[in-house]
Amino acid sequence: MSGDFHYKVLDVRHSSRYKAMRSAVYFPIFGDGWIRKWGVGGTAVRLTGLWRKRVLELRNAGWHPFESRIDRQYARNCPPFGVIATTTARACGRAMVCPLCYARRYVLKSFLHLEEVLFGGTHPLAKPREDLRLVEFVARQRVCLNERSAWEPGAIFRDWCPWVNGYIYLHRRREVDILKPQYGVVLHRIFVDENHGHGWLARSGLLLVHRQTPASWVEEVLAHAIPEFRISCTRHKGTPTKRLLREATGRAFAYPVSMLRADPAYTVAVLRGFHRTHMLATYGPQLKCAFEKEDQMGRRTRPFVPEEPEVPPDVREALGVVEDIKYTVEKVDEHVREEREDFFGSVVKKAKAIGATIEKTNRVTAGQREALDNMLEGVRKWVHDDEEDD
Ligand SMILES: [Zn+2]
């Protein structure tokens, strides 16, 4: 029994943000004709298939987060985006590699924030601000890997991360101080090309600058400050339309397809090396888009609700443990669960009650967290790790 959810697509979401996600992720993976060949629903299902295969490849290459069967199953059931499906599940959250979470965490977030600043919200007929112009850029730095050992995780972490973080800081300062963008989203991606023995670090972004900011400044700041990077940069003329924003998002934040296709060992090395690096940076006013949270969960969206309270990370984590407990219990063999109905029933009931309190108070005590962790450990013992991978 594999435990894979069968996602049947009921409907396709047509808002610009979903189109932006599709163009950023589907295009690099499936090429130009994907919509003609399989349609939106069919492509979503295909992508889930590719991702499931990749989960096993990464596990076989020794990637630690996919060691346990439960975690792998979570990842394999990561829900599709931009469609309404019969089943829903929690997103796996491995956004650096999972193309579904990549779309949700990086593309959706970027698009929503830019849309919020430029159009004041998600309304399809909202007019854009006329005082802003869109700057789109992609900068690439080739990293030679003459020896495979260059991808040794320790080396990546030691040599690359401080370098990447240094660059992030440097670029940001210059962009903020000189260009004074109203809003900026910058994403770092890593492409692996094992056949040619090198990799690419790409730094790409979209900036909303004042319309009087001269194009020459933009180029100067983005291109000449860092000669190591090969940059292509466009300052779009005229008031940005939603279509332009959507297409530019798709180009600037395209999914690094080698994460799905490159030699798994290289990919694992990249994932290990960069796991503490912030790949996405935004600057400008602090924004809160309610859609974002909802979409991360793969659920239906609600209208923009600016006054929604912030959920602290420890609360989110604790609620995640509650979900893990419920999920784990569902995975216990049916006859075992029936035999020990009292035990499993009371664990789930207790976990739900603690979860409800945490949700209501929006805080979590050390005792509550410990109780949840113990419960999870307790139920995990009942799940066998003997899946047949296919
Ligand atoms: Zn995922």
Image (cartoon, rainbow, N blue to C red):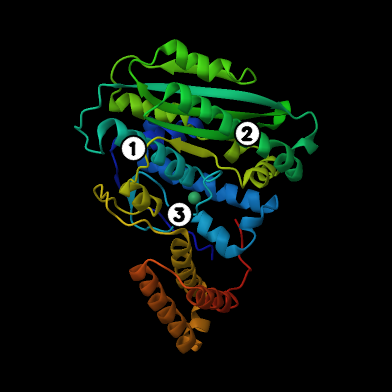
Secondary structure found at label 1? helix
Occupied quadrant, residue 179: top left
Residue 222 location (% of width, % of height): 52, 20
Beta carbon at label 1 within 8 Å of ligand 1? no
Q: Which residue is disc 3 drawn over?
A: 91
Residue 365 location (% of width, % of height): 47, 73
Which quarter of the image is occupied by the N terminus? Answer: bottom right
| Residue at horizontal 56 percent and vertical 64 percent from the top | 70
Residue 138 location (% of width, % of height): 52, 23
Q: Which residue is disc 1 drawn over?
A: 17
Q: CA distance from mark 3 to mark 2?
A: 31 Å
Tell me: 340 left or right of 387: left
**Mark 3 vs mark 1: which is more N-terminal?**
1
Residue type for callout 1: Arg
Vertical comparison of 365 with 29: above or below:
below
Q: Which residue is disc 2 drawn over?
A: 166
Secondary structure found at label 2? helix
Tell me: 296 left or right of 335: left
Q: CA distance from mark 3 to mark 1?
A: 18 Å
Can residue 336 be seen here?
Answer: yes
Comparing marks 3 and 2, which lies closer to the viewer?
2
| Residue at horizontal 37 percent and vertical 42 percent from the top | 286
- Labelled pair 3, 1 in contact (Cβ < 8 Å): no
Residue type for callout 3: Ala
Residue 55 location (% of width, % of height): 59, 51
Binning the other alpha carbons within 10 Å of mark 3 as few (below 14), some (14 to 19) or many (20 upward) gives: many
Residue type for callout 2: Gly
Q: CA distance from mark 1 to mark 2?
A: 31 Å
